[in-house]
Image (tube, rainbow, N blue to C red):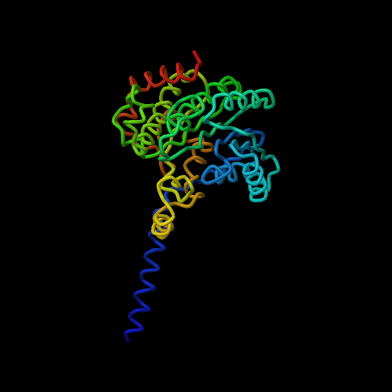
Amino acid sequence: MALLKASIAIVLIAVGLYFLKQYCGGGVCHSKARLDGKTVVITGGNTGIGKETAIDLAKRGAKVIIACRSKERGENAVKDIRKESGNEQVYTRLLDLASYASIRKFADGIISSEPKLDILINNAAVMMCPFWKTEDGHEMQFGVNHLGHFLLTNLLLELIKKSAPSRIINVSSMAHRWPSTIDFDQINNETAYSPYYAYGTSKLANVLFSRELHQRLKDTSVSVFSLHPGAVNTELARHIIGDIGEFLATPVRLILFKTPQQGAQTSICCAVDDDVLKLSGEYFSDCAMKPSSPAGNNMELARKLWDYSMKVTHLQ
């Protein structure tokens, strides 16, 4: 009898965990839209949700260019994506978002070789790392997650506008809710540095950048979105989970976190679903528009961020 009760308890726990895992999986993109003839650039497309996004869009017939820092990792990812999607039009180009020189070289390469760019997905990120600086002297998380993508987007913007109707997608995070503003004087201050606050600030910048860019593109057919992919079981958290923490956290992450494929769904939705076009400038989560934080709706802060970003990326 004791064995029977134990067996029933195990089965009930297993069933409960299964349904909990399904619930935590979040929204799914149901659009069947094809992307034949479209060109897509995805930063950080060699791993995690970027790679899963690349697989999905390649399956839809798009030409996909994944941008990453490592030639070897990029080439290995291309092989995987081609195999999974059945699409040979998948390529990799080197891009280090912590280097303005690398960003400009990448953008020049895209402009000179690609007649159009229909979808830009700014997906790559650094999360809660120690205080590091980019090649150009900016705090790493703000430098990569926001400034790198800000510069890249603006360098590619004329090509994107020429390719309209087109889309720009900025992968943010619910962490954008952590800061109530952006203190521009403290961004590069090592003594005041908090890896959590700095990450949240960079993700708030993604939301504000999307809102301001939408305002500047209102008279074009370029749509802009920011999004929260969910808590996703990827290598992004490598700076906050050590070996022991990884061992302890693995069961929780396997159950409560999304898989990379599930985490890619909102990026895919913003890239292909025509129903979202009327919602340009908005923030999404689980394939639906969601309210951002009050700071994420602060258009005065968005304009200050734009002006600051233009100055430090030497675009003005």
Q: Is residue 40 left or right of residue 21?
A: right
x, y (%) of residue 270? 49, 37
Q: Nearer the viewer, residue 83 or 146?
A: 146
Q: Is residue 232 above or below residue 182?
A: below
Q: Residue at x 41, y 57 (%)?
A: 244
Q: Nearer the viewer, residue 314 or 35?
A: 314
Q: Nearer the viewer, residue 90 or 242?
A: 242
x, y (%) of residue 181? 30, 27
Q: Quadrant of the N terminus?
A: bottom left
Quadrant in the picture for residue 164: top right
Q: Is residue 223 left or right of residue 55?
A: left
Quadrant in the picture for residue 108: top right
Residue extending farthest front: 191
Count all numbered tags in the image, as a single digit: 0
Q: Residue at x 37, y 34 (%)?
A: 198
Residue extending farthest top: 316
x, y (%) of residue 37? 67, 34
Q: Residue at x 66, y 43 (%)?
A: 75
Q: Is residue 239 left or right of residue 83?
A: left
x, y (%) of residue 228? 41, 40
